[in-house]
Amino acid sequence: METIETRKRTRRRASVAVRDCVACGCCVKVCPLGAISVRRGLYAEVSDRCVGCGRCAAECPASVITMVEDGTSGEVR
């Protein structure tokens, strides 16, 4: 029987395809923790504060934000 202590929890986080990001800022506005910022006016960047709620991915008009398992590459370049 699997217990809570032995169950491996996978944590999700947002990942931005920076090449395709249009830096509109929609993700910044909906992030409840302020974990996303627009860098150099070119692309969105996700900080370690991301808890993987998925609001940014749902809001992104360009569909360039995906939710990935934490520990994988954070940004797609």
Image: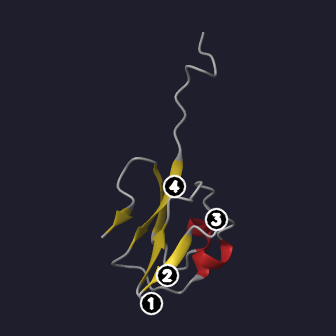
Closer to the camera in the image, 57 or 6: 6
Q: Which residue is mark 4?
A: 13
Amino acid type indicated by mark 3: Arg
Q: Nearer the viewer, mark 3 or mark 4?
A: 4
Amino acid type indicated by mark 4: Arg
Q: CA distance from mark 2 to mark 4?
A: 17 Å
Return the mark for residue 38.
2
Amino acid type indicated by mark 1: Gly
Give the answer, above or below, for where 3 lies relative to 23: above
Mark closer to the chain start, 4 or 1: 4
Q: Residue furthest bottom?
A: 41
Residue 72, x across and y down, in percent: 37, 50
Give the answer, above or below, for where 45 lies relative to 22: above
Q: Nearer the viewer, mark 3 or mark 1?
A: 1
Quarter of the image holding residue 39? bottom left
Q: Are marks 2 and 3 in contact (CB under 8 Å)?
A: no
Mark closer to the chain start, 3 or 4: 4
Q: CA distance from mark 2 to mark 3?
A: 16 Å
Mark closer to the chain start, 2 or 3: 2
Residue 10, x across and y down, in percent: 52, 39
Q: Which residue is mark 1?
A: 41
Q: Are marks 1 and 2 in contact (CB under 8 Å)?
A: yes
Quarter of the image holding residue 29? bottom right
Q: CA distance from mark 4 to mark 1?
A: 22 Å
Q: Residue at x 60, y 9 (%)?
A: 1
